[in-house]
Amino acid sequence: MTNPKKNTNKASHKRKLTPIPSVAFVSLGCPKNLIDSERMLGLLAADGFAISGDQNDADAIVINTCGFLEASKQEALGVIREALETKKKAEKKGKSVRVVVAGCLVQRQRSQLLDEAPDVDALVGVFDRENIVAAVRGGVKDDGNKISQSNMGTFHPVTQLISRHDRTKQGYLEEDGARLRLTPRHYAYLRISEGCNQGCTFCTIPGIRGRMRSKPLETIIAEARELILDGAYEINLIGQDTTSYGLDIGFGAGLSGLITALDQLPDIGWIRLMYAYPSCFTDEMIHALADTEHFVKYIDMPLQHINDEILFAMRRKTTRKQIETLMEKLRKWIPGVNIRTTMISGFPGETAEQHRELVQFVRDFGFDCLGVFEYSPEPETPAGRLWKTAAVNSQTVRERKQEIMLAQQEVVFKKNNAMIGQKLPVLIDWVDRKRRTARGRHAGQAPDIDGQVLIPHCDVVTGEVVNVTVKDWKHYDLIAHMDKIKLRTVVQQLDVSLPLLQIS
């Protein structure tokens, strides 16, 4: 007579030994793309996939691409070719591996991508990320039925995406909840809108991400609460144009109302505003930032240039005078504000005189943080077409970029020297326990793009907020000694949510 209990145990034992399909994930590009990666990882994990940091052992490799500039396209193609080479090696050993490419490059250049990498198994555009599980599984649903090719591994225009949902719901946008985060636990990015209506002549975003679509306020609040419960102390607000938040959905309070609402969340630490657009930044927004408790005195506002003729050619909808007036208000109404910006060197038709005007402006204004991009000709943009007849020599563009950065370097070094002796609260990002050193950021430094605070001889954990005294500086970083007081102590804290995943 058989023993039913014994057989059940054997069956259970076999199930435990059955390997769980695994996915290796590569995330390229900006924080907006990172959120898409985190959402897709969340969907894959919820469907039962194990997330692996080793492409050689994974059953599938997903690459979420950036397609904003030609350089990002080439980087993505390099990563894709590496994944396909891994796939070929696995096939020689009798193992089947799927390579799935997602993101902006798929949305922007799907046909060209298929020509350059024909062995890719599936493509998932930015409007179709919810299909990532089907793409990775190979088009088979859990019930065993085949998924049609039209619903798997392709992208859908915005109109088709909206047609699958309630057309009466204003501002439809896929929600970003239930993410498997790639950032350290103590900070996160929160997308408040998608797409852009500004129409800058150098930018490919509207062609990739579509027109601006704001998330409803209640959705943003719910996602912020989820991030806080997940351990996030710092939340960075992002979107292609955060300043225009709410205009497309009839939310009259706009960004000012959103700022006020988020500031009232319990248990929130720092909130940071990124990607503000200068022509839309109102007095109400400045006052809202100045009056809040949790919004750090920091604004990321890409200006791109200061010369009126270049600003007009870029279609930035602003002038030097308007920019200077806005900058003056920000510094006057938000004492101690840190202003970060980005500039473009070598825009088509830029003269030596216009470049000198930009360099002098950088010296005179004294931005706290500044980045420079060499102009990249994107063929489908108005500036890309202008570049054919008004291109600036590539060597000249590089030299102009260097001049701008050297001017900014002078500014930063003076600012860093003036900070010696100041006491600052610092959020700890990284710890070397053996050497008892740490790296963190004060409120005027955003993750990944700005300088850091280096703290030797300290015992801290990531996610803590500690008081430090600035003792010295090195290049763009401050060197500080930790005071005895810790403003926020973390009992249990992960250094990185998923340390093995590749992020670029």
Image (cartoon, rainbow, N blue to C red):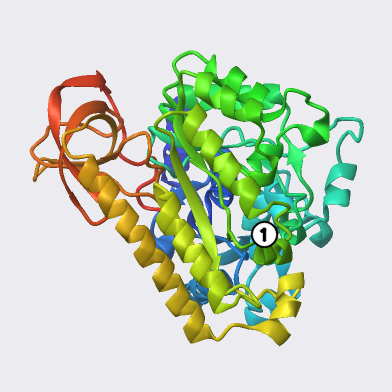
- Residue 71: give x, y in percent of width and height: 54, 73
Q: Secondary structure at mark 1?
A: loop
- In the picture, measured across the screen, residue 462 lies left or right of residue 151, that is left
| Residue 170 visible in image | yes
Q: Quadrant of residue 111?
A: bottom right
Query: Residue at point 64% right, 40% down?
Result: 242
Above or below — where is 388 with respect to 141? Answer: below
The C terminus: image quadrant = bottom left
Above or below — where is 301 with respect to 97? Answer: above
- In the picture, measured across the screen, residue 377 lies left or right of residue 152, that is left
Query: Residue at point 60% right, 32% down?
Result: 177
Query: Residue at point 43% right, 66% down?
Result: 404
- Residue 20: give x, y in percent of width and height: 48, 48
Q: How many marks?
A: 1
Q: Residues within 10 Å of mark 1 (few under 14, many from 20)?
A: some
- Residue 248: give x, y in percent of width and height: 81, 36
Query: Residue at point 70% right, 56% down?
Result: 316
Above or below — where is 363 with respect to 285? Answer: below
| Residue 140 visible in image | no
Residue type pointed to by label 1 = Gly
Instruction: Name the residue beneath numbered marker 1.
Output: 138
* Residue toward you, 222 or 286: 286
Q: Quadrant of residue 162?
A: top right
Above or below — where is 281 with respect to 152? Answer: above
- Residue 365: give x, y in percent of width and height: 45, 50
